[in-house]
Amino acid sequence: MMIYIMTFNADAGREEFTPGEENQITPGKTIADWLATKLAVFGVVVEDSYEEDWGWEMRLDVLHDGQQQGYYLGVSGTEIGPKIEWKLTITKQRSMLERLSGHNVLQHGDTLIETLQRLLRENDHQVTDSHWQPE
């Protein structure tokens, strides 16, 4: 199974990196909420985001090739000097049979990947890196 990773820099969510706060949330909530709002405009059905130890994740349903497809979108951030580098991790939800048979894999040109790239570009967030990674 393949995972698609995109990174971009944005000042949004900087407040999530305030040091020394008790009950500090894991960075990524601001970007996850922003993405959920923007993706809904593109017809993506977004379930509530939930916190993980590495960031935030949400489940999405996207119409792809005439069928609803399930995905997971992870959001995490790293403060690098004056910038915040946000990382989006995209995986496709697949049944056990699809995994065993190698069907319904995340691929180049996937609707969700194309939508995220367009959304970031239209909001002046340049993708600084994108790559495939085996799970």
Image (cartoon, rainbow, N blue to C red):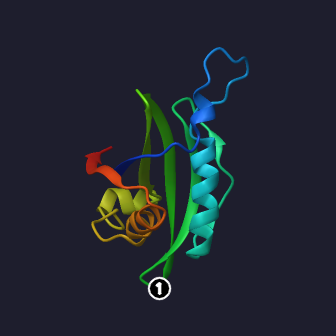
Which residue is more in the foreground, 43 or 34? 34
Residue 80 lies, with reference to residue 1, above or below; the image says: above
Q: Residue at x 64, y 52 (%)?
A: 33
Residue carrying label 1: 66
Could you tell whether 57 is left or right of 105 in the image? Answer: right
Q: Residue at x 58, y 41 (%)?
A: 56
Number of disc labels: 1
Residue 60: percent from left, percent from top: 57, 62
Q: Residue furthest front?
A: 82
Q: Residue furthest bottom?
A: 66
**Callout 1 crowding tier (Cα within 10 Å): few <14, some 14–19, many ≥20:** few
What kind of residue is marked 1? Gly
- Give the vertical position of 53 relative to 88 (above or below): above
- Asked if 121 appears above or below 68 in the picture, the reply is above
In the rendered view, would you say 76 is above or below 46? above
Residue 107's x, y, as percent? Answer: 29, 65
Is residue 112 in view? yes
Quadrant of the image containing the C terminus:
top left
* Left or right, residue 110 beside residue 94: left
126, 57: nearer the viewer: 126
Residue 25, given in percent of the width and then of the height, sits at: 66, 30
The answer to whether residue 2 shows anywhere in this view is no
